[in-house]
Image (spheres, grey):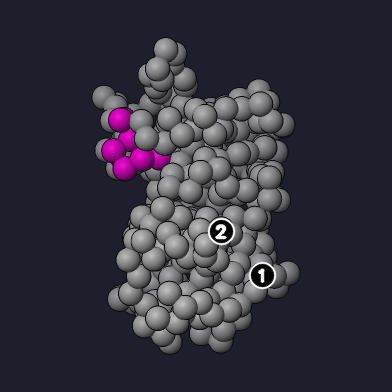
Amino acid sequence: MKLKFTKMHGLGNDFVVLDGINQTINLDRQQIRQLADRHFGIGCDQLLLVEKAKGQADFRYRIFNADGGEVEQCGNGARCFVRYVHDHDLTKKSEIRIETLSGVISPRLERDGNITVNMGKPVFEPKQIPFIADRCALTYQLEMLHTQVTICALSMGNPHAVRVVDDIASAPVVTEGALIEKHQRFPNKVNVGYMQVIDRNHIKLRVFERGAGETLACGTGACAAVVAGINLDLLDYQVVVSTQGGELTISWQGHDAPVWMTGPAVTVFEGEINL
């Protein structure tokens, strides 16, 4: 089976994008893992699949982690999705509606080439994250082996745990993040963000993504971190998020308002692979 693909990235969070409209794609979990493998395949954090919408949207957007599991949402991927459908003449619209497992999102291609995405409203109700807790709270104590850690828990279409740390460079992203990712209180696993507050309009962020490990950037993780910081009164309503791959701008007016994310999306190369 031969597949045409496009390699893209959003701030170093990299993707293999497949056109499921003009070619038939039916991949199993092992084939997805093969494509994502950086030694034996193309290499990516996530695989993105462009499909025809099932409802009234313009497209359907499916996301698979490097381990082959399908997930609900990916912010950096959403920006790459918009760049892809424009570059491949699948649409002429500057703003499109895209179906995802977590609902419809509406990304917009800006004149400067950046992409702005309405990421929807954050969800704090534990059952909807999902997260096991007796009640909704700003922070939670999570039992970790011989200690406890403080987290904020919320969903940006996918589950996130946010940790506030003093120094992002020395944060235990890989070790502790891997344990929190699979913590029993998160039934569907969780993305784990480590946030260092620089000032009320600027944070640094590292994210351990479920099914992928630490990535150079995470769009929904940036949204979750800013929302958590605003709720904790550490941040104002518009924040620059510095990741290892570059910067995103995230804004949220609080309460029932949607979260807005603006950042770049880049095509690296195109090719064909024989599975």
Please name the residue that numbered disc 1 is placed on. Answer: 268
The answer to whether 4 appears left or right of 205 in the picture is left
Q: Which residues are magenta?
A: 184-190
- Relative image position of residue 99 (x, y in whole percent): 38, 68
Residue 91 visible in the displayed image: no
Using the image, determine if residue 47 lies above or below residue 85.
above
**Three-letter code for the amino acid on which mark 1 is drawn:** Val
**Three-letter code for the amino acid on which mark 2 is drawn:** His
Specify the farthest residue to the top: 146
C-alpha separation, residue under disc 2 versus residue under disc 1 = 18 Å
Please name the residue that numbered disc 2 is placed on. Answer: 39
Sort mark 2 into few (<14), some (14-19) or many (20+) by Cα contacts within 10 Å.
few
Residue ID at (59%, 55%): 13
Q: Is residue 187 magenta?
A: yes
Sort mark 1 into few (<14), some (14-19) or many (20+) by Cα contacts within 10 Å.
few
Q: Is residue 102 magenta?
A: no
- Relative image position of residue 121 (x, y in whole percent): 43, 49
